[in-house]
Image (cartoon, rainbow, N blue to C red):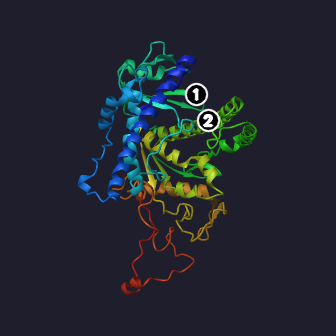
Amino acid sequence: MHAYRFALDPTPGRVGALLRHAGAARVAFHWGLARVKANLGQREAERSYGIAEDALTPPLSWSMYSMRKAWNLAKGEVAPWWAECSKEAYATGLDQLARAPENWSDSKSGRRKGGRMGFPRFRAKAKVTPSFRFTTGTIRLEEDRRHVTLPVLGTLRTHESTRELHRRITAGSAVIKSATVRRLAGRWFVSFTVEVERADRTPSRPDAVIGVDLGIKTLAVFSDGRPAAENPRHYDTALRKLGRLSRALCRKQGPNRRTGQKPSNRWRRANAQRNRVHYRTAVLRADALHKLTTGLAREYGTVVVEDLNVAGMLKSRKLARVVADAAFAGIRRKLAYKTVWNGGRLEVADRWFASSKTCSGCQAVKPKLPLRVRTYVCERCGLVLDRDENAAPNLAALVKRHVAGSGPETVNGRGADRKTPPRGAGGSEASTPQRPSRDQARRGPSPSNGRITEIR
């Protein structure tokens, strides 16, 4: 599957239709959530009365099929205006509700990546991102390559040409499966999920291996001596302008949910201006990452990166902003699918491999190398090199020591799949000796696993 996103230029009348469809999705979501919460509350109240479990009110099904069937029976009373919007708008809200409890359960048990998700809640109109999805009906690109047609909404003009996707559809190598409409930073976008038949590709240097060391001072340092990719720091560049716009926004009458105060028109305009700066910063960052990862995937047969603990870095008050702006996880995610598209492969070094502490000349390992020390000095062979330039060749050298059977990702899909070894992450003894536990004292000393060189 591949996604193509295009900005829309709808007329004021069409903007109202887009907002109605997004509101219809939210109404369907709220209706289903209220129905389920009422059922759960009724069952809980009956339990408090001492009613047997088999005599409780029957539970409601959270499946999409059951929700949609119940909505079709109640929509005439709940939403008498339901015919003004496509049925897919209501299905969007019901589908989101059907997925919510599974996501909540998986997040609670640790099976879902990312931050902890809570139980589904009602969505405030002012905070939710207006969006809806079409899976059936008339979804096509017009021949002029400047318009798209969607169910009920009709033909909408696009801000940019759709020629790339139109050529694939005309040639029969792509089929549109769904279309998602969303408003971001005051603009409307349509994203097409497309099933694409890709031709087999081969990198320009299929046997070449490159190690990529990611960092904050320099975004990416490469093992083959090519110029490093400087960190553009897009957010830091926009901070001054964002600060000025934020101060201007604070001087205007904004919304207040506690008192019910509505925002003034001047506040809305100022907020939209600030949001455009945030959006431009995100777009510039994504463009730079796409250019970097596309160049690597098209040239090298094997790309090696580190399994960085990005979530842990974001907890640091000093590093959180610059780490988030660098988007380390985005680089790895883009390389993962672009190397497959271009016939290469991505190897992810184990999180505990000491790439910065290991000498790229003689493979000696330092017991400690603080982050403030930017130059690597080897006491054994006398190598003096920038720590990032020293780490990149170590990553590339790991391919020669690749352990058979290991894949491009870690076992649990979220990072490291083992605890820190007894001798420390770098393979050398820790500076502070640890007192053995009673069980370890009875069993005696355990053999060391040595340095981890396995690639994940």
Residue annotated with mark 2: 279
Q: Of 201 and 27, which appears nearest the observer? A: 27
Q: Of 98 and 3, which appears nearest the observer? A: 98
Residue annotated with mark 1: 187
Q: Amino acid at mark 1?
A: Arg
Q: Amino acid at mark 2?
A: Tyr
Q: Residue furthest bottom?
A: 442
Q: Residue furthest front?
A: 49
Q: Of 436 and 68, which appears nearest the observer? A: 68
Does residue 390 appear left or right of residue 154 in this picture? right
As drawn, 451 above or below 88 = below
- Seen at 38% across and 41% down, the residue is 35
Quadrant of residue 391 within the rendered picture? bottom right
Q: Residue furthest left?
A: 54
Q: Quadrant of the C terminus?
A: bottom left
As drawn, 58 above or below 394 = above
